[in-house]
Image: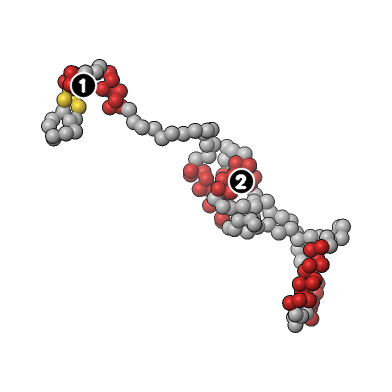
Amino acid sequence: MHLKAEENGSEGKTYKEVQKMIGCSAKMISNALKWRAKPERRGRKRKTTIKMDRRITRMAKAQPMITSRMIKDSLELPVSTVTVRRRLCVAILFSRIPRKVPLLKKRHVQKRLQFAKEHINWPKEKWRNILAARRSHPPPQGCFTLNVTHSPFTQPH
């Protein structure tokens, strides 16, 4: 077998010629030519590929209220839902658990609109007092509360 000579542009040399020049075995020369530096890797091997990660984030962006279990099942991923949530957190997509809230009826919408029209000219100080009072007193037992999740495109505070 001939080796390519790197310097002086001369033609290649055989293993025997290189062996005589360097003073080592032909096997060592063969191993040196085959050797490639491998990137250093530590820890456990990843269960998802880069392609899988991209599919997970693409689906979460397309359907912001989808759960991690639904993502896992629809993409048929061989990982747990916790792993799916981890990949979404790395992609800065948080809160994959949609909250259920009661739907507003027409009567509720009308009452809210009426309240807004009645109190449109209130000063900021009055609103501050009401907001402070609501924070200090929890809602009564059995009352529906609105559970707010973070937007899937922003980080939680």
Front-most of residues 99 and 18: 18
143 sits left or right of 101 in the view: right
Q: Quadrant of the C terminus?
A: bottom right
Image spot of residue 134 (x, y percent): 80, 66
Q: Amino acid at mark 2?
A: Arg
Residue 66 vertical placement versus 29 (above, below): below
Q: Which residue is mark 1?
A: 22
Residue 151 vertical placement versus 105 (above, below): above
Residue plotted at (68% across, 51% down): 97
Q: Which residue is mark 2?
A: 85
Q: CA distance from mark 2 to mark 1?
A: 56 Å
Image spot of residue 125 (x, y percent): 76, 76
Q: Quadrant of the N terminus?
A: top left
> Could you tell me if residue 18 is visible in this image?
yes
Front-most of residues 29 and 104: 29
Residue plotted at (80% across, 71% down): 130
Q: Amino acid at mark 1?
A: Ile
Q: Earlier in the sequence, mark 2 or mark 1?
A: 1
Image spot of residue 77 (x, y percent): 57, 40
Query: As drawn, which residue projects farthest toward the top?
Result: 25
Is label 2 or label 1 in front?
1
Q: Disc 2, disc 1: CB below 8 Å?
A: no
Image spot of residue 75 (x, y percent): 57, 44
- Tell me the element at label 2: helix
Residue plotted at (17% across, 30% down): 5
